[in-house]
Amino acid sequence: MKKIVLLGPPGCGKGTQSKLLVEKDNFVQLSTGDLLRSETSDGNSDLGKKVKDLMESGELVPDDIVIDIIVKKVEEHKNENIVFDGFPRNLNQAEVLDSSLDNVSIKLDHAIFFEIDFKILEERINTRANETKDSEKRKDDNSKTLLNRIEVFKSSTLPIVGYYEEKGIISKINGMQMVNEVYAEITKIIC
Ligand code: AP5
C-alpha cells in the first residue's frame, strides 16, 4: 500500500490529481483543506469561526487542530493507499506525519512536488471560482487572498522540499502540463 504526499502552491493541481488517483488507482484522498471546510461548515462554534477566518485570509490553521484531524484519518486508513493533499504544510507537520506513520509501522513512499510558474495560479483559481456555483464558491478563491496563500506557501511549505530531499523521497514534476500529462508523471513515480 502506497503513502504519498502532493506538495505545491495553491491551484497547482494537487486536488485534481488526488481525485484521479482515487478514481483510477484506488487511493484514499486526505485533503486537510476539504476536511477543515467540512468540519467548519456550520461555523457555529468559536473554534469553527476562528478556523474559517484563518482559511478565508489564506493563513494556516494552527498545527494542533490540523494534526488532530489527520492523525485520526491515518489510523483509519493505514491499510489503504493514501494521497495526502495539502498536508504537511510546514516542517512541524512533516515531522508529525512521519511519527504518526511510524506509530503504525508505515513509511512515506513519495513526496511529489509540483513545479509551476506562480503567474498562472491566479488564472487557475479564477477559472475555478467562475466555474463553481455561488453557494459552493471558496471564500479564499480571490486574487487578494491568493497572493497571501502564495506567500504562506513560500515561507512555511517550501522548506519541506529540502526535508524530503534529505530523506531521498522527493520527486519534482512539471505542473504546467495538461492534467493527463501530470497524472502520467505521477503514476510513473509511484509504480
Ligand atoms: P487547501 O484546500 O489545501 O487549498 P490549496 O492548497 O490552496 O490548494 P487548492 O485547493 O486551491 O489548489 P490545488 O493545488 O488542489 O489545485 P486544484 O487541483 O484544485 O487549503 C485551503 C486553506 O485551508 C489553507 O489556506 C489553510 O488556511 C487551510 N489548510 C489546509 N491544509 C492545512 C494544513 N495542513 N495546515 C494548516 N492549514 C491548512 O486546481 C485548481 C484549478 O486548476 C482547478 O480549476 C483545476 O481544474 C485547474 N487545473 C488543475 N490542474 C490543471 C492543469 N494541469 N492544467 C490546467 N488547469 C488545471
Image: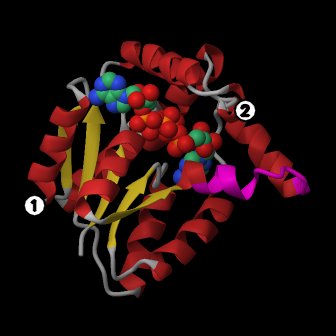
Q: CB of residue at label 2: within 8 Å of ligand 1?
A: no
Q: Is residue 148 left or right of residue 163?
A: right
Q: Give the residue drawn at x 24%, y 56%.
A: 24
Q: Which residue is mark 1?
A: 191
Q: Name the amino acid type tagged 1.
A: Cys
Residue 124 x/y as whole percent? 43, 20
How far is disc 1 from disc 2 in space, using C-alphas? Answer: 39 Å
Q: Nearer the viewer, mark 1 or mark 2?
A: 2
**Residue extent of the magenta highlight:** 35-46
* Image location (x, y in percent) of residue 61: 67, 49
Residue annotated with mark 2: 135
Q: Which is nearer the eye, 11 or 91?
A: 11
Quadrant assignment for the N terminus: bottom left
Q: Give the residue drawn at x 46%, y 54%.
A: 87
- Name the side, left or right, on which 35 lies relative to 25: right
Residue 47 x, y percent position in the rendering: 84, 56
